[in-house]
């Protein structure tokens, strides 16, 4: 698991640095994020009463793991409202895909 790759949807170097290079911690945090991402994706309905709370939660969690594009999409959605949901969903899918690939590379290393 190297952070030498260019930053895409997720800046893995951010979390690696925050975890002081502890690969076990990084893996656990990212696995938890992926688990949450699945629940968020299923609940990302702009008509749902908790939509704004969900967007706010996603913003903080994504920034905490280095998924800054998702965090930025959520911040925009807080301002723009439900019309920004497709951008949030796309950023969530991109982050989840990169995290899945990152974890798979780490397990094969």
Image (cartoon, grey):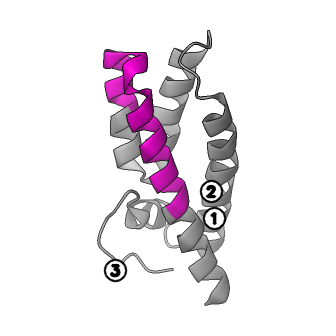
The front one of 103 and 42 is 42
Q: CA distance from mark 1 to mark 3?
A: 19 Å
24 displayed left or right of 53: right
- Vertical relation: 94 (above or below) 6: above
The furthest residue to the bottom: 109
Q: Which residue is nearer to you in this view: 104 or 17? A: 104
In this rendering, the answer to whether 106 lies above or below 35 is: below
**Element assignment for label 1:** helix
For the point 36% across and 47% down, the residue is: 68
Dot 3 or dot 2: first in sequence order is 3
Report which residue position mark 3 lands on: 4
Q: State the predominant SS element of the stretch in magenta.
A: helix
Q: Position of residue 95 (x, y in %)?
A: 48, 54
Q: Position of residue 44 (x, y in %)?
A: 58, 28
> Which stretch is magenta?
74-97
Q: Which residue is mark 1?
A: 25
- Disc 2: which residue: 29
Identify the element where label 3 is drawn: loop
Pointer 2 local density, CA inside 10 Å: few below 14, some 14–19, many at least 20: some
């Amino acid at each position: 698991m190297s952070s030498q790759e260019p930053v895409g949807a997720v800046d893995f170097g951010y979390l690696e640095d925050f975890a002081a290079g502890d690969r076990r911690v990084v893996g656990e945090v990212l696995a938890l994020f992926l688990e949450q991402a699945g629940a968020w994706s299923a609940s990302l309905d702009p008509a749902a009463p908790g939509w704004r709370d969900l967007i706010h939660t996603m913003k903080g969690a994504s920034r905490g793991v280095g998924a800054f594009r998702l965090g930025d999409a959520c911040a925009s959605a807080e301002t723009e409202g439900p019309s920004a949901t497709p951008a949030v969903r796309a950023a969530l899918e991109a982050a989840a895909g990169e995290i899945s690939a990152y974890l798979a590379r780490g397990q094969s290393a």
